[in-house]
Image (cartoon, rainbow, N blue to C red):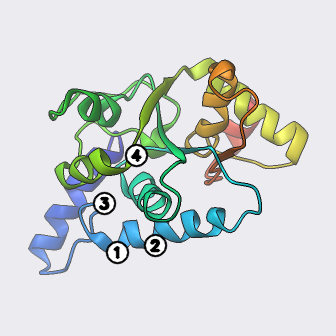
Amino acid sequence: GVDFDAAKIFAKKEAIEKDLRFVEDSADVETAIGAGTIGLELLSHPAEIQSVLVAVGNGALINGVGKAFKANNPNTTVIGVQASGAPAMIESWKSNSIICYPAINTIADGIGVRIPVPEALADMKEVIDEGLLVSEDFILKAMKLLYRVAGLVCEPSGAIAIAAIMEYPTLFRNKTVAAIICGSNLTDEQLKNWM
């Protein structure tokens, strides 16, 4: 398909035709529970984390991590981050309604959601304190910074939390901040063009 949602629609159709269980990221609780282990790991950090930034795709990662923090350290600000070219989940969360888009326009295709998952949005109401949208320019800058400084090859979706820190530095100045970095799915051409 042309994007993540098109692939999901196709996979759901295949599951129905072949009588298979379709596990939908964030609609099925197992994915959020798995993601929650990242939050538990961060909570073991010796210093109290004041803000945690998490990429928002379908919602399992932000909901799992957010629930871990809200249950164990509710003072931590949980911040969801999406690309400005694919803002459906953050905009839906902010407006308390489902906002769909006909297309996305971002290099962060791993979190490029056009059609929000209602179950995830319901959970997000309980765990997110703030939602940020970041520009393509800062996503690329974050990828390059992670590669240059930490030797990490990150896909755009994996670097988006760092992009938020770079684009909104005053929000995080003098704070202990955790940014979840995950995903390194890049083609050879993308590596050549972006790194």
Other-residue count near label 4 (Cα within 10 Å), few / some / many at <14 / 14–19 / ≥20: many
Q: Earlier in the sequence, mark 2 or mark 4?
A: 2
Q: What label does residue 34 carry, if any?
A: 2
- Disc 2 to disc 4, how far (Cα)? 15 Å
Residue at position x 82%, y 41% in the image: 147
Label 3, on which residue? 26
How far apart, in angstroms, are the residues tagged by discs 4 and 3?
9 Å
> Of the residues under marks 1 and 4, which one precedes in the sequence?
1
Nearest to the eye among marks 2 and 4: give it: 2
Q: x, y (%) of residue 126?
A: 30, 50
Type of the residue with mark 3 = Ser
Q: Say how many tags the image has.
A: 4
- Choose between 121 and 16: the one closer to the eye: 121
Mark 1 element type: helix
* Mark 3 in CB contact with mark 2 (< 8 angstroms): no
Question: Is the C-beta separation of discs 1 and 2 under 8 Å?
Answer: yes
Q: Position of residue 35 (x, y in %)?
A: 48, 66
Between the C-alphas of marks 3 and 1, the distance is: 8 Å
Q: Is residue 95 above or below residue 32?
A: above
Amino acid identity at mark 1: Glu
Q: Position of residue 85 (x, y in %)?
A: 42, 23
171 vs 12, nearest the viewer: 171
**Residue at the location (65% across, 62% down)?**
42
Q: Which residue is mark 1?
A: 30
Quadrant of the image containing the C terminus: top right
Residue pointed to by mark 4: 57
Q: Amino acid at mark 4?
A: Gly
For the point 63% across and 64% down, which residue is it?
43
Question: CA–CA distance between discs 1 and 2?
Answer: 6 Å
Q: CA distance from mark 1 to mark 4?
A: 16 Å
